[in-house]
Image (cartoon, rainbow, N blue to C red):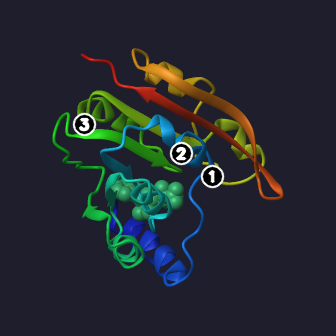
Amino acid sequence: MSGENRRRWDAAHARAAGGETPPPAPFLVEHVALLPVGRTLDLAAGAGRNARFLAGRGHRVVAADASRVALAEIRRRCPDVATVQVDFDHPCVRPASVDAIVCVNFLDRRLFPEFRAWLRPGGVLLLDTFLVDQRQVGHPRNPDFLLGRNELLERLAGYRVLRYREGPVEAGSAVHYRAGIVAVRPQN
Ligand SMILES: C[S@@+](CC[C@H](N)C(=O)[O-])C[C@H]1O[C@@H](n2cnc3c(N)ncnc32)[C@H](O)[C@@H]1O
């Protein structure tokens, strides 16, 4: 992540700091029972709405993000969650060291091989973010951050898919276009 991007994220998190924790992502709430309760990596955790929810369900959560401001907010809101400052340009997670990975509203396609390496065999990935159709209705519009139709199914070929949904999702009074998956890492 460039220094400019980091400052932008730090500033965004600083503006929201000190407020109420927003509710966890609906796709996570709906499917949390499919995740093994164990060591769970919340990737690009932001200010920790999902990490806090997972910790409340008994997960040993490690929240990873590049923003120091976000991580400080997580420690304030949920002391049970371990935090680690990671730039996903240079990720460093031990192979087969996590039972579950949760990644919401974040896409870095370079990480798909890493997910498979970091999860133990039988570990579960939950990923939920914006679909390419989202650009017709709002942000994000950068194709780097938008999943193609069926892209998750293609990138996670070999995983056992427990849930997949793609298309319009109600978000308050708006409609967002999203893709979400819960999938089990194969044994080898
Ligand atoms: C939209 S927020 C997602 C927050 C959270 N997952 C949620 O659902 O509330 C994206 C987060 O990704 C982090 N991020 C962006 N690029 C990153 C990178 N290269 N390495 C680590 N974190 C990054 C930002 O700091 C930000 O907190």
Q: For numbered disc 2, what is the local secondary structure?
A: helix
Residue 21 is situated, as x and y percent measured from the top left of the image, at 54, 72
Of callouts 1 and 2, the N-terminal one: 1
Q: Is mark 1 within 8 Å of ligand 1?
A: no
Read off the residue under disc 2: 145
- Amino acid carrying mark 3 in the image: Trp
Q: Are marks 1 and 2 in contact (CB under 8 Å)?
A: yes
- Which residue is outermost to the bottom? 18
Is the CB atom of the residue marked by disc 2 within 8 angstroms of ligand 1's nearest atom? no
- Up the image or down, 7 lies above or below 106; here it is below
- Which residue in the structure is indicated by mark 1? 140
Residue that badge 3 annotates: 118
Q: Nearer the viewer, residue 91 or 182?
A: 182
Q: Nearer the viewer, mark 2 or mark 3?
A: 3
- In this view, 141 is above or below 53: above
- Along the viewing direction, whichever of 122 and 89 lies nearer the viewer: 122
